[in-house]
Amino acid sequence: MAEKIIYSANADIETVDFDASVERVYDMLEANGMFIENSYIGGRNYSQSYYGYQTYRTANFTLRVPKERFEAITGNLGELGNVTSLRTDAQNITAQFYDTDSRLASYRIQEENLLGMLEGAETVADMIAIESRLSDIRYSIESLTSTLRNWQGQVDYSTLSLYIYEVERYTESVPIQRSYWQQVGDGLSSRTRGVGEFFMALFMWLVVNLPVFAILAVIAAAIALIVRSQIRKDKKRYAPRNPPNFPPGSPPNIPPINPPNNPHVAPPDNPPDSSM
């Protein structure tokens, strides 16, 4: 009896050329007799592209690979990009497969026997009982046939799940055994690169939003001019005015109440008694 083994693999792949990697996936399909079970490509939207934000795309593929090509395909995934992880599984279902196949053969024999009994049935009650049992047998046959067909499909075509994601640069491989100063150098390099990326992103943000800043500056300048003009008008309106005979800059001419020796002011009705 041939072994029934279901192979599957999951791979994470980063790429700096997303379009080329996706195109290679389709080339692999045509060259190896594979087919796509499901797929998804996304990660870029209009808003991010319009405002100049950096966007990264991703792709998910579930592929079915002929079992004789499975090992070669998984060994050449590096053609799609930098493989950061790869996991393969093998499930041996030989015992379950042939046990189910034996049960299916037994049910088919029972079906043939019941058909023969149905032809020789003499009463309606016997016919009804045989047909009921025959219905149960046929349901079991259909269920087991579907299970075997599904298993055989998974055996013949292995499952390969790919997760491809776009990156600016590949992840650097770092040796496990490193000296102290190598670790310090790696840390400094990482921080320096991070600071540089921050300022580059900041500069891009400023350049992209420069038209907005210009419009806001014009609006602010217009508001400042309006406020300044209004303040000047209010100062002129409420400032005290000097008579025309006084030179500019002199204090305001406010006459005192009942000034002495002023002939224009009438004396009080009851002058104070001088004798006191």
Image (cartoon, rainbow, N blue to C red):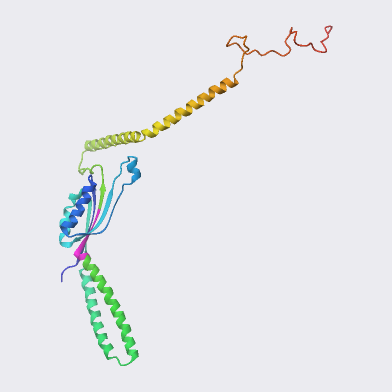
Is the magenta region chiefly helix, strand or loop? strand
The answer to whether 251 appears left or right of 201 in the picture is right
Residue 195 at x, y percent in the picture? 30, 34
> Relative to 194, is 275 above or below?
above
The image position of residue 96, as x and y in percent, is 23, 70
In the image, is residue 171 part of the stretch drawn in magenta? no
**Residue at screen point 35% across, 90% down:** 125
Image spot of residue 48 (x, y percent): 34, 43
* Towards the viewer: 243 or 54: 243
Along the viewing direction, whichever of 38 and 168 lies nearer the viewer: 38
**Residue 159 falls inside the magenta stretch:** yes
- Which of the 4 image quadrants contains residue 34? bottom left
Q: Which residues are magenta?
A: 154-162
Q: Position of residue 13 (x, y in %)?
A: 23, 50
The N terminus lies in which quarter of the figure? bottom left
> Which quadrant of the figure has residue 262?
top right
Residue situated furthest bottom in the rendering: 122
Q: Is residue 93 left or right of residue 128?
A: left
Asked whether the viewer can see residue 82, the reply is no
When the figure is inspected, residue 264 is found, relative to residue 81, above or below; the finding is above
Q: Is residue 124 something that shows in the picture?
A: yes
Q: Quadrant of the C terminus?
A: top right
Quarter-wise, where is residue 172 in the image?
A: top left
Which residue is at a point 51% across and 24% down the rendered structure image? 229
Q: Nearer the viewer, residue 3 or 225?
A: 225
Q: Is residue 193 above or below residue 163?
A: above
Front one among 22 and 222: 222
- Taking the image as shown, residue 191 lies to the left or right of residue 32, namely right
